[in-house]
Amino acid sequence: MNTQTTAAVAAYTLTTGRLFGTAAAFLALAGVVLGVLALIRPAAARRRAMLALATGAAGLIVGGFVVGLAKGGPGTGYGVVGGWAALAIGLVATVLGGLALARSRRPGTPA
């Protein structure tokens, strides 16, 4: 009879899973900021839109890896909460970047 127990991790312990989950969430959050700036300010909107797409996609990928490789749920130290946050925020960043890129490609709008 083989029973595995997951050792409890302290709430403030920074594990590698938590580090990668948090980093992915912050990367995706930077993409949201760039996407909003690309929508608000027309100067350099195309470059900001591309950066928002790239950082949002990177947040989605890293967040997906963190969630996919986790062996436990929230509170186990695998970074599940940060990974799910990165997935959600990365999706928003990707959509904002796509909208800003589509708006910058329209004829008659300032680039």
Image (cartoon, grey):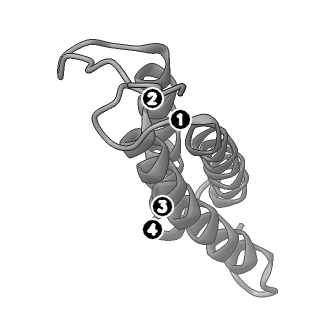
Q: Which residue is drawn at 37% across and 25% down?
A: 77
Residue 110 visible in image: no
Q: Quadrant of residue 75?
A: top left
Give the residue number, with chain letter if any, for mark 1. Answer: 71
Measure the alpha-carbon separation of dots 1 and 2: 7 Å
Give the residue number, with chain letter if any, for mark 2. Answer: 78
Disc with the residue nearer the chain's start (1 vs 3): 1
Disc with the residue nearer the chain's start (4 vs 2): 4
In this view, which residue lies farthest toward the left? 11
Residue 107 point in image, percent of width and height: 81, 86
Measure the alpha-carbon separation of dots 3 and 2: 18 Å
Residue 97 point in image, percent of width and height: 63, 64
Measure the alpha-carbon separation of dots 4 and 3: 22 Å
Q: Is residue 37 left or right of residue 62?
A: left
Give the residue number, with chain letter if any, for mark 4. Answer: 40
Dot 1 amino acid type: Lys
Q: Which mark is residue 88?
A: 3
Q: Is residue 106 above or below residue 3?
A: below
